[in-house]
Amino acid sequence: MEYRENPYTQRAQEFFRDNVYPETVKTPRLPKILSVVLMVVVVGFVSTGILFIAFNKNAENQYRRNDPTPQKVINRSKRSKTKVTTYNELGQMRPITRAPSETEAGTVMVVTPWFSFPDDDTPLYEEISQKDRLIKSIIFEYFTTHTKEELLLTGEKKIKEELTEQINEQLVMGKITKLYFDEYQFFQ
């Protein structure tokens, strides 16, 4: 068998030799710009996520979970052995927190407290009704003797526990079981 050269091979070699481009081929700028924009967006999402995770504890202090409604508390207690009723006639209170310094003013708060107590305790209900103003003054005084920062650091749960204890110290016929807030906000 005899080897013959392909006639098209020589033509192809001549074509590629004659059509070599001396300058570099420019790629369009659009893909480069899109990749930069995509990188910025990805870095933005990642940094936002990191900041959210890092400062999530502070965010929890500024937002509160709503307490259950009085009716929900009563309904839950019906399923348990200890039935409770609620006293929600204290109304909305607007105490001003203690000023953090002599040059600054205190912060106005809006607090709407209510509490639960045993369902069948009529003497306790009558005592609470008679000591309505005393209970309001205990709650009002508590908030006016603390700064906003102290209250935020203490936390709403601990505040409720301390107020429940102070109110129960003034009651003779029985004890309230738990204190709730319909509203609990600071105003600037």
Image: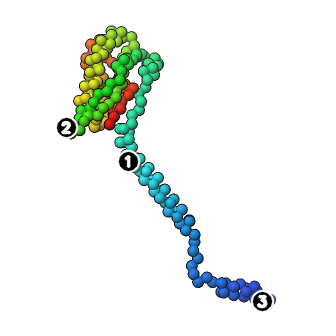
Instruction: Say above or below: 15 vs 180.
Output: below
Left of 109 or right of it: where is 49? right
> Total marks drawn?
3
Residue 54 is marked as 1
Q: Which amino acid does label 3 sit on?
A: Arg
Q: What residue type is labelled 1?
A: Ala
In the rendered image, residue 153, in percent from the top left (x then y), is placed at 29, 37
Q: Residue, x 39% and y 26% (percent of image)? A: 182
In the rendered image, residue 147, in percent from the top left (x then y), is placed at 25, 34
Residue 4 quadrant:
bottom right
Q: Residue, x 38% and y 41% (percent of image)? A: 59
Tell me whether circle 3 and circle 1 mark residues in contact (CB < 8 Å).
no
Q: How far apart are marks 2 and 3 (CA)?
A: 106 Å
105 and 6: which one is in front? 105
In the rendered image, residue 158, in percent from the top left (x then y), is placed at 31, 30
In the rendered image, residue 68, in percent from the top left (x then y), is placed at 43, 25
Residue 4 is marked as 3
Q: What residue type is labelled 2?
A: Glu
Mark 3 or mark 1: name the one nearer the start of the chain: 3
Is residue 168 shown to the viewer in this render? Answer: no
Q: Is label 2 or label 1 in front?
A: 2
Q: How crowded is mark 2: few (under 14 residues within 10 Å), some or many (20 or more)?
A: few
